[in-house]
Amino acid sequence: QVQLVESGGGLVQAGGSLRLSCAASGRTFSSNAMGWFRQAPGKERESVAVISWSGDYTDYADSVKGRCTISRDNAKNTVYLQMNSLKPEDTAVYYCAAASRYRSLIFGSSSLYDYWGQGTQVTVSS
């Protein structure tokens, strides 16, 4: 059974940092694009960051550029999202996803991701 399991979410004050992890099991995604998404209450899911299979290509939502860094460790089958200078508007459930048919995807191609985690809650207090 293929699983993506996110961890690292929690409650943090504005200006704080969190590092989200997404560990894959059941198959390797070392040759695939992966991404982070988020969904806040009452809002649609949005793309946060994307990374190519090699890590050479990354891209971010304008709202998090300069504050977040996506990275991956293919040996550990894990993707990370380092979030700094967090704001209350970053509060959301964060999901990681893998695109098993693509080595790289341009930012925003959420419909092309076919494996999704269950999400981890990030709450930023003001």
Image (cartoon, rainbow, N blue to C red):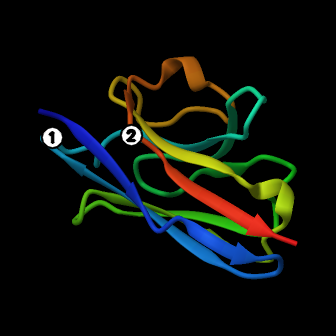
Tell me which residue sits at (47%, 45%) in the image. Answer: 119
Check the image and report above or below for 113 versus 81: above
Q: Which mark is residue 80?
A: none
Which amino acid, by three-letter code, is at mark 2?
Answer: Gly
Q: Would residue 4 be seen by someone viewing this image from the given angle? A: yes
The one of 21 and 124 positioned closer to us in this rendering: 124
Q: Position of residue 10 (x, y in %)?
A: 56, 68
The one of 58 and 85 positioned closer to us in this rendering: 85
Image position of 62 (left or right of 121): right
Which amino acid, by three-letter code, is at mark 1?
Answer: Arg
* Residue labelled with disc 1: 27
Image position of 123 (left or right of 115): right
Check the image and report above or below for 110 versus 46: above
Q: Dot 2: what SS?
A: loop
Tell me which residue sits at (85%, 55%) in the image. Answer: 89
Would you say the residues marked 2 and 1 are in contact, meaning their CB atoms lie under 8 Å apart?
no
Specify which label sits upstream in the sequence, 2 or 1: 1
Q: Position of residue 41 (x, y in %)?
A: 73, 36
Q: Position of residue 57 (x, y in %)?
A: 58, 51
Q: Would residue 50 be seen by someone viewing this image from the given angle? A: no
Q: Quadrant of residue 106?
A: top right
Image position of 45 (left or right of 1): right
Q: If the image is split into quadrants, where does the C terminus sit? A: bottom right
Q: If the image is split into quadrants, where does the N terminus sit? A: top left
Q: Count residues near mark 1 (Cα–Cα under 10 Å), then give few for <14, some for 14-19, many for 20+.
A: few
Q: Which mark is residue 117?
A: 2
The one of 50 and 39 positioned closer to us in this rendering: 39
Q: Dot 1: what SS?
A: loop
Q: Position of residue 42 (x, y in %)?
A: 77, 29
Is label 2 or label 1 in front? 2
Distance of mark 2 from mark 1, alpha carbons? 14 Å
